[in-house]
Amino acid sequence: MSDLLESALNPKSVAVIGASENIHKIGGRPIHYMQKFGFAGRIYPINPQREEVQGLESYASLAALPEAPDLALVIVGGEKAVAAVDECAARGVKSAVVIASGFGEAGEEGREVQRAMARRARAAGMRLYGPNTQGLANFGNGAIAGFSTMFVEVPPADGPIGVVSQSGGMSAMAYGLLRGRGLGVRHVHATGNEADVTVSDMAWAVAHDPDVKLLLLYLETIADPELLARTAAYARERGLPIVAVKAGRSASGQKAASSHTGSLANEDRAVDAFFRHHGIWRVRDPHAQALAAEAYLKGWRPEGRRLVIISNSGASCVMGADASEEFGLPLAELSASTRENVASRLPGFATATNPIDITAALLSNSGLFGDVLPAVAADPAADLFFINIPVAGAGYDVEAFANDTARFEAATGKPVVVAAWQASVAAPFKARGIPTFGNETEALGVLAQLASHTALMRESHAPWPEALASAPGSALALPQGTGRFLNEAQSLALLAAHGVPVVAHQLCRSAAEARDAWGAVGAPAVVKACSADVPHKSEHGLVALRVGSADAAAALFDAQWAKLAALGAAQEGVLVAAMHKGRHEFMVGARLDPVFGPVVVVGDGGTYVEALPDVAVLLPPFDTAEVKKALDTLRIAPLLGGVRGEPPLDVEALAAVVVAVGRLIVAGGGSIASIDVNPVMVGAAGEGAMVVDALVERAGT
């Protein structure tokens, strides 16, 4: 990590501006925590009203200190906070944590004060944390530059987890939930308003702590996606899972774009795509982060997601099988030899197939778990193990069950989780480090997350040439003009020039040309007005389908030409195009996201694409294999392989269109705001895909 971030996470000296004798006040908590939790550096309380604070010499000002501290906490408020930050910068402080609120969160005036304060700090070479933050905490060295009450409520213990959050409340909540599950936490950092240092900065720093084995993030905005992407890449290299909560929506993401793609590839879908692309697992809240933490810390990295269920209840076996299907965890097909081995260890009325019901015989033979687990472990079809104990207690040797399970896990390294709602049954498993949950939904959800996240972290992305961005005068330069949209003829031509198959068409500027074009493209044809001023033609009755004669094409030209004039739109022509049929209509689009850059969307197409959205979002670069995987997540995915005797669709051709559209917007180098391709007519396998309508939007217009 950089020296400046090091000065905040591992400072040799800390000044507390606004220090208090009262350990329950904001100015007193950090001093109390650092003294209590083993900070070995120097602490300088600054309070001109006192000679001593919590047993330490107090100083009247920052200037009175014997040295420039590495880190300063600014706890005074209002204008005093701004003055204190400026004083820190002038004194040579490396990092300042501004606890005070009333800045960016209070309105535009506060945001400007905050921005100016951050600019002055950076100009002096000082990093700024906050303002409006609960602060930083490193329990590995006792550097607690924060005031969270949670550190009083739940005593800290150093451990292999890092928490980085914009919200102080969410950082404290994650910490409390983790500690409540008996897990140690090293880093608990809140970035607040992020006038300077962001979650991405802190994630990068914490990811480089070699003792951290799990990184949890809470974000409301992603201020530096490039750094977060680099952090994720580094984390994958060292096998560090990142699990994130992303709340809220950016104002730019909420603003509806005029193109279909803008509304379908909204900010939250783009966030999902960004996380998937970089191997970050997204969950809903800190409860979900804490729930799965222990499984991650076991170091399990399953090769697959095939599940073995073992229970002492037939009903639990059935319910577990139902739940496994909901979580996409197929039951492992055990080999005949495995089933015979299992059957030889169970009473004759027990079930040796998966799910394995060892029955109430467990009451009289406490060794059944220890007998069955090794017999199944050798089967190559078994990736994950779930033990469900719906009832046990008096007469059951639960300690033996837990010992056998722990031995199995240690010997095989395979993931095994337990569901036991009785505290007395759960306790022995928890004591031996076996992830234990109150019900099968939680247990199987964690296994599914672990398997899915492991697979995600192992994915690689096909690189695209770095020289895709266009330059003035190159083949990628857009047609001249200042309007927001290209007309349809220009849009189709741009796509065709970059490898996208487009329908046969002609741009006509007279009825006679329309008559000739109808003969050239063949019957039936489509006749539609072409004007950059009317991007959505069907809304104005400017699209005619199944045109069956040359006379009809000529008459439609005259009518649409007149309608353009009536609308006050530029009369750029009328398109006469072949009517291309496919077996299914898809939409493909791309947009320039204000946070993530080029974003590509593919999904069910046609008239109702916005009313009934069924889309997947990808971030470049990607190849056709990644597109096909994304298509499998759609609600219409069962149609891709053919249903009710229909042939499978040409998914390969559709995927090639998606890749080509993605490469086009990247090649635009920021000149293309969005691309709408709807519909893409996709035929049966081998019949290809054809774009029959397109709209390209310029950026910056």
Image: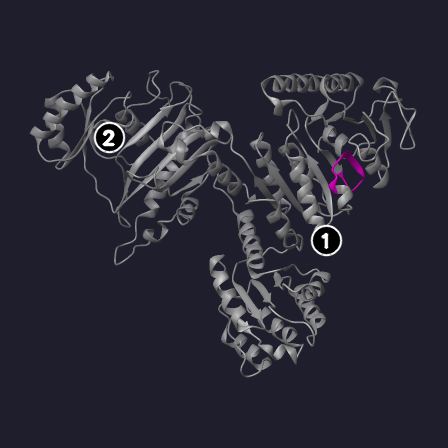
Q: What residue is shown with label 1? A: 182
Instruction: Please state which of residues 270 and 226 is positioned toward the viewer in this rendering.
Output: 270
Residue under the image location 48 percent in, 63 percent down: 322
Look at the image and tell me whether residue 223 can be seen: yes
Residue, far bottom: 348
x, y percent for residue 448: 54, 55
Residue 476 visible somewhere in the drawing: no
In the picture as drawn, the residue positioned furthest to the left comes out as 551
Q: Residue 343: where, in percent of width, then height?
A: 55, 80
Q: Residue at x 26, y 55 (%)?
A: 646
Can you give x and y, in whole percent of width and height, for residue 255 in the image?
44, 28
Magenta-colored span: 138-150
How packed mark 1 is, by other alpha carbons closer than 10 Å (few <14, some 14-19, many 20 or more), is: some
**Residue 495, image x, y percentages:** 32, 31
- Placement of the N terminus among the 4 image quadrants: top right
- Specify the amino acid type for callout 1: Gly
Residue shown at 67% from the left, 20% from the top: 118
Q: Secondary structure at mark 2?
A: helix
User: Where the C terminus falls, by quadrant?
Assistant: top left
Q: Which residue position holds label 2?
A: 538
The residue carrying pointer 2 sits among few (fewer than 14), some (14 to 19) or many (20 or more) residues within 10 Å by Cα, namely few
- Numbered disc 1: secondary structure: loop
Q: Callout 2, which amino acid?
A: Ser
Q: Is residue 401 above or below residue 234?
A: below
Taking depth in this image into account, of 54 and 258 the one nearest to the observer is 54
Instruction: Quadrant for residue 605, please give it.
Output: top left
